[in-house]
Amino acid sequence: MIKVLLTDDHALVRTGIKRLLEDSGQVEIIAEAESGEESIEKARELKPDVILMDVNMPGMGGLEASRRILLHDPDQKVIILTVHAEQNYPKRLLEIGARGYLTKECQLDEMLLAIRKVHEGGSYIEPRIAQKLALSMLPGNDSNLMDRLSQREFQVLLMVSEGLTNAEISRKLCLSPKTISTYRSRLMEKLEASNEFDLVRIAVEYGVVDFAQSVLTE
């Protein structure tokens, strides 16, 4: 039986995924977490075989939580489960050591296959996402604007797009407000944005955040 830590901020989503996976007889959900912070705690305490991690959650979020989990224990096996099929997320998450990437549109059989492969030491990327990644690397393709950003700059962009202030971002990333202000300036320069609204527009345009989740809707 593969022991899984399930992280998602929506209780109904966790309940549905848990029921489906446990009914298969192949997986045991040993714990649930509703935030990145809680996922880090439970990963260190319980050492699950596989961690299913949502990306967009209030607070730290799945990107930073995955980074910290894997920094503490590189042998942890993280599979990202998210609504995002765009190439920016899988690329960033694979760079920090995630072993798998699935969208929430996947079928149960595919999720089980991903969990088994990752548990056995392999990796799994949903085929349509893998195809997008492969095509983006072909010669002649225009470089992605997001490729200009470092991992930390990308994290700050996510939080800016969620409407967080410098003080809030500094608390979540354990960095000084002055450092966050520097990252914002770098983002404006690298993404050729004239203001913060422009930053969010670019993030939405490149699929970094959903329009509905961005501060553009406020």
Image (tube, helix red, strand yellow):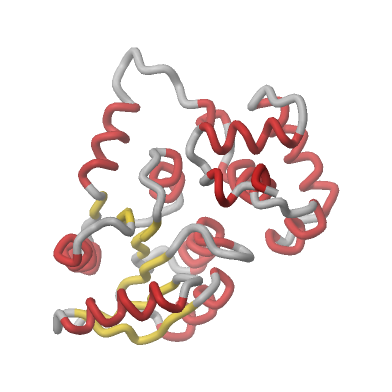
Residue 83 figure quarter? bottom left
Task: Write the residue at 63% across / 41% down.
Answer: 153
Q: Position of residue 110 (x, y in %)?
A: 17, 60
- Looking at the rendered image, the quarter that the N terminus falls into is bottom left
Q: Nearer the viewer, residue 213 or 110?
A: 213
Q: Nearer the viewer, residue 45 or 170?
A: 170
The answer to whether 16 appears left or right of 97 in the picture is left
Q: Nearer the viewer, residue 100 or 54?
A: 54
* Residue at the right extreme of this rendering: 178
The answer to whether 196 appears left or right of 69 in the picture is right
| Looking at the image, residue 121 lies above or below residue 39 | above
| Looking at the image, residue 100 lies above or below residue 127 | below
Task: Write the residue at 50% across / 75% down.
Answer: 39
| Looking at the image, residue 177 lies above or below residue 189 | below
Q: Position of residue 121 (x, y in %)?
A: 22, 63
| Looking at the image, residue 157 lies above or below residue 69 | above
* Residue at the front extreme of this rendering: 217
Task: Write the residue at 42% across / 17% down.
Answer: 142
Task: Count the labels in the image.
Answer: 0
